[in-house]
Amino acid sequence: MAAYVIVDIHITDPVTYEEYKKQAFPTVQAFGGRYIARGGAVETLEGDWVPGRTVILEFPTVQLAKEWWGSDLYAPIRAVRQRSARTRMVVVEGA
C-alpha cells in the first residue's frame, strides 16, 4: 500500500536549502519514492494552518518511506535540511 510523506518546511537559510534540494532527489528515488508536490502554491482551505514550503512524497510502502528517512544515504542530506530549515514531517498510509 502506498505511503505519503508530507512535509511543511520553513526555510531559514535559502542558499543551503538549495543544496539540500539538489542532493535529496536521488535518495528519494533510491527507495522507490517520487515527488507528488514540491513547493508549489499553497492555499489554506480551512483552519489556521499556514504552511511554508509544502512537499509530498510517495513511496511504495510506509516501511520504504521510513527506511529512506533513516538511511545512511539520506542522513547527511537530512542534516543539511535541518541546518537550513524548520521542518514538520509525517508519513501517512494511503487508501
Image (cartoon, helix red, strand yellow):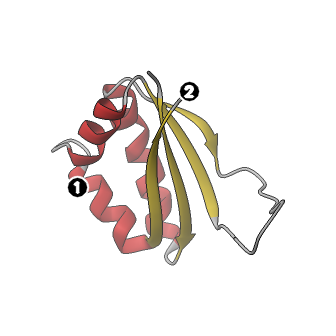
32 to 43, vertically: above or below: above
The answer to whether residue 73 is left or right of residue 17 is: left
| Of the image marks 2 and 1, the number of the one nearer the N terminus | 1
Classify the position of the C terminus by image quarter. Answer: top right
Classify the position of the N terminus by image quarter. Answer: top left
The answer to whether residue 81 is left or right of residue 39 is: left
Viewer-proximal residue among 66 and 22: 66
* Residue 22 placement (x, y as % from top left): 45, 46
Which residue is depicted at the point 46% across and 67% down? 87
Q: Amino acid at mark 1?
A: Pro
* Residue 60 placement (x, y as % from top left): 41, 22
The residue carrying mark 2 is: 95
The residue carrying mark 1 is: 76
In which image quadrant can residue 33 be found? top left
* Residue 7 placement (x, y as % from top left): 52, 55
Which residue is depicted at the point 35% across and 68% down? 82
Q: Amino acid at mark 2?
A: Ala
